[in-house]
Image (cartoon, rainbow, N blue to C red):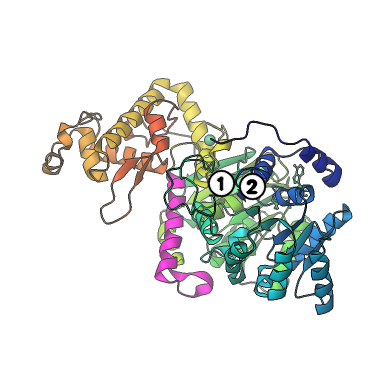
Amino acid sequence: PLRPPESPPPSLDAVLAERFGIAAFRPWQREAIEALLGGAGRVLVVAPTGGGKSLCYQLPAVALPGTALVLSPLISLMEDQVRALEARGIPATFIASSLAREENGRRLAALRRGEYKLVYAAPERLALDGFLEALAASRLSLVAVDEAHCIVQWGHDFRPDYLRIGAALARLRPPRVLACTATATPDARDEIIRRLGWPLPAPDGAGDGGGDAVSGRGPEEPPPKVILRGFARPNLHLQVSAVDGPREAGRRTARALLEALGDPGRPRGAGIVYAATRKGAERLAEALRDAGWNAEAYHAGLAPESRARISAGFADRSLSVVVATNAFGMGIDRPDVRLVVHAQPPSSIEAYYQEVGRAGRDGGPARGLLLFAPADIALRRRLCQLGEGGVEASADDAARAWGLFRELLRYVDAATCRHDFILRYFGDEAESLGGCGHCDVCLEVDALEASDPAALARDNDLVRRALAGVARVKGGAGLQAVASMLIGESNERVRRMGLDRLSTFGVLEKKSHDEAMSILRALLANAWIDLTTGEFPVPLITPAGWRVMRGDVPARVRLPVPAARRRPRRA
Ligand code: ADP
Ligand code: ZN
């Protein structure tokens, strides 16, 4: 790791306090700013909305000589930031098509004279020669690409003009570039890096760029430092429950509301319920009204007046429960949401975390309950094919959507801490809560540890044996054959592949083939093993799996309970 040992120049803290009136950096903000100012000068910051990403370019813009260019998708966002900066006495402006030609001309001239610390513009400006020339003629301290996920062509917020940014960076060659986004999927991250013309950082290097065995690293640009933080939500209790269909989902939702908000007549805070379809949302709202809740359905099929009325009611607290499709959320920032229920599974982990993240914004305890019924999987398959707005999705888009949903199914099946699963998915393992005590799996494992520690130890042992088996096969066989090898089943296939000669042959000899398969699925769900893609996928052990296998970290796993051990449980 090439971490500079010296502490940052104290002036950063001084600038923070004196120019921004903020007492202290969030730790990752300092990390991002240091990476931008020293070292490679190429940084991608991934942090949730409201996390404080703008400071990561505003503060260096103020501290450095020259002018910072901030590329941003919306004029309203630019106006807000420029107003706030001006109020702090920081010279800033924006250049946009909404302004008169002469006004833009005046601002460009002032930019050339170096009168601004920050200049905001939308990427479509980059198509205009006058703008690029003015930038080339001025001393750029850095370029910030805000809402960088708008560059992802298959993303929801794609903006074609963002594709101009790569070429503009190549031409302007600014000394520092910072890209910011709240979109955390690994695919989107890689796509942003690629589109900006940067080489991908080493896969396992946590963005430190320390290894030099990276293939395809361009000679001109160093790989960016990727800083991904702030996704942990320790005040959120996460739970997944199986139900048999929409009626039970309705009953469970009503009960969860009662537990979280108390008396429907005088609720403590609010609840948001997500349904996969408009019809589902309408029916569920009706069921909740029958149960005494002041609940309304909200979806894209409503008239704009109805939607505005519901949003306003929710904001002013006259309405306490909204049953919505994913159309609800933008701009909803009620801090006292105590419960988010997904009556059906959402489309992806990312969508799930964004939606469940609307609970507990005030930092108080809040709960996320995800319900799924067997039929929901087929329903989602159809929705993937249907695509946005009822237009049939292309085969590629449908496959991508289905892949994202399968990640969510892995979450549903996960046998370890749900918070850790999500942080691992986003790559924010630094914030792992390590057996959080705030999710159903951890509570079950804790209970098992208290009531039957030997059983927990046995499960840990099984996991480590199975991992050792997968490691030993080294990708030489598929899941079924590995399961046979683990239980010591010497069939023809096993002998042909030489699996019966491995030292791990029969390490799970007391298990059935089905049990071995379900253990392997649990390993997959926890990303301790992964399947190769292609026609004949084979399991391989992952770095996280090695750590568990070696006993560096306990598995703390809740394996599928064999019938004999299953005890009657409270409903
Ligand atoms: P993002 O761009 O990540 O959505 P913003 O940059 O708009 O978030 O910041 C959200 C709010 O957090 C702003 O009001 C900002 O002033 C505040 N903020 C940022 N950094 C800090 C900090 N270190 N301490 C306290 N408040 C902060
Ligand atoms: Zn947990």
Residue at the bottom extreme, as displayed: 101
Alpha carbon distance from label 1 to label 2: 8 Å
The correct choice, above or below, for 129 with respect to 62 in the image is below
Badge 1, how many Cα within 10 Å: few under 14, some, many 20+? many
Which secondary structure type mostly characterizes the magenta part of the structure? Answer: helix
Q: Is there a contact, CB below 8 Å, between mark 1 and mark 2?
A: yes
**Residue 569 appearing in the image:** yes
Membership of 401 in magenta stretch = yes
Q: Would residue 436 be counted in the magenta stretch?
A: no
Could you classify mark 2 by the number of other residues whose Cα lies within 10 Å: few (under 14), some (14-19), or many (20 or more)?
A: many
Residue 369, label in figure:
1
Q: State the image coordinates of residue 352 (x, y, percent, origin top left).
A: 55, 52
Residue 61 appears left or right of 35: right
Residue 312 visible in the displayed image? no
Where residue 566 appears, as percent x and y from the top left, is 37, 32
For residue 571, above or below residue 242? above
How many numbered badges does the structure rendering display? Answer: 2
Q: What stretch is highlighted in magenta?
A: 385-413
Of residue 354 and residue 451, the one placed in the foreground of this image is 354
Q: In the image, what residue type sits under mark 2?
A: Leu
